[in-house]
Image (spheres, grey):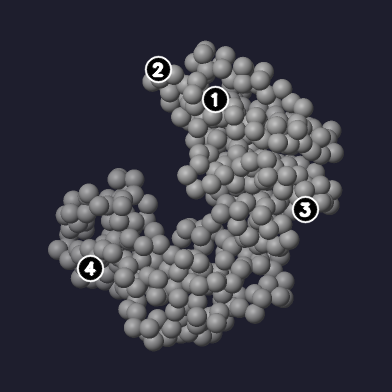
Amino acid sequence: MIKVAKFGGTSLADAVQFKKVHDIVKDNEERRYVVVSAPGKRFKDDNKITDLLYLTHAHLKFSVPYAPVLKLIEDRFNEIKDELNLDIDLHSEFETIRNMLDNKCDEDYIVSRGEYLSAKLMASYLRCDFIDSKDVIFFKYDGTVDKKKTNEKLGAALSKSSKAIIPGFYGSYPDGSIKTFSRGGSDITGSIVASVAKADMYENWTDVSGFLMADPRIVKNPLPINKITYQELRELSYMGASVLHDEAVFPVRQAGIPINIRNTNEPDNPGTVIVGDDQVDEDYDNGHVITGIAGRKNFTFFYIHKEHMANEVGVVRKALEIFEERNISIDHIPSGIDSFSIVVPTECVEKTTHEIVEELKDKLGTDSVKTYKNLSLISTVGIRMAFRPGISAKLFNALGENNINIRMIDQGSSEINIIVGVDDKDFENAIRAIYNAFVK
């Protein structure tokens, strides 16, 4: 069995955390390939190494002396090195970085050094191979991953190593220059490594023990989610419930590799396992028909009504074009016979609401366009909800019994989620009511 383990910034914040990672990797020989992030915060008001590296480049860009910031970074890495008694030459590494800075290196190079140095330290600590991501993760000039070249080079490097440390977050362009993923991109690196290694499990170690069935800031002590499908995860993460980089899911999902979200500070906690939709077994629901509840506040509804709209072709298309021209993504389009609503995040239309209303009236030939603000969307998700009578009734009854008015209802044909719209003021109470109805 092959496991790929990715450790986030909080898991590598200092020498104490490095020791935890060391013990986790040593505890199971199946953890053959380890992807690491740059050291994160040690305490609330601390700085992430990556943030300091961005600041270093900003100093360089605006001709401000960068040495004091780089010294903070160097001290952090030397502190880890000294506490772990590692025999590694960090001085020459930082001399190389200074030379690159003095020669006006680009931002991607400097911000990638956090992961690079973190991996160097971990490889020395675990006494295993170091594989530089720039030599095995490749980008095209349009910024997309060159899958063919990456699979070939990374596959060859992994096949030669029984255990290796790989820095996350970056790769290289065809000319050899460094290219980074977006922030949080170490998750993507881990996913790519797991896919190429044909791993049996991709472990993502962070500072939380997987997913919970609801936001603990709203529901007191919500139950953990032991298993969740990729499809369910997508539904919940869209509404804000996620500890994974969105793009990190695709390579392993495509390869049929489960993801295990684990907690570095609680290594005995099994966390949450994300599985394929075809890997659902009989005990999947763990006694609950729903998997989780998530939601977001601050939506605006544009309500459009026009007599005999049902007999007119192209009305919805014309309305959507108005939003498309402004690069505004649509969240939902609930509809009636002669009416429909367009639901968008309020922040996207705050300054243009009146302008959009007038354009809708003009383009659609109707005077009946209204807007409703301060609305929330709540998604109740569960693959076991499909084809089971009474789920909607139970949810609606729970809201009604708590005197919560439903402003919108939407359910996809897959039946794995029910989305309701409520007033922002009812958001927390609505989530608690739904949770209590299905879980308690």
Residue 348 in percent (x, y) is at 31, 51
Residue 376, quarter of the rendered image: bottom left
Type of amino acid at the residue the image marks with label 2? Ser
Residue in the image at 76% along x and 42% along y: 33
Residue at mark 3: 200
Q: Earlier in the sequence, mark 2 or mark 4?
A: 2
Amino acid tagged 3:
Asp
Name the residue furthest front.
Answer: 83
Q: Is 253 situated left or right of 163 in this image?
A: left
User: Which residue carries the number 1 mark?
Assistant: 71
For the question of whether residue 311 can be seen, the reply is no
Q: Secondary structure at mark 3?
A: loop
Amino acid type for the residue under numbered disc 4: His
Relative to residue 382, is residue 22 drawn left or right?
right
Q: Is residue 366 left or right of residue 61?
A: left
- Which secondary structure lies at badge 4? strand
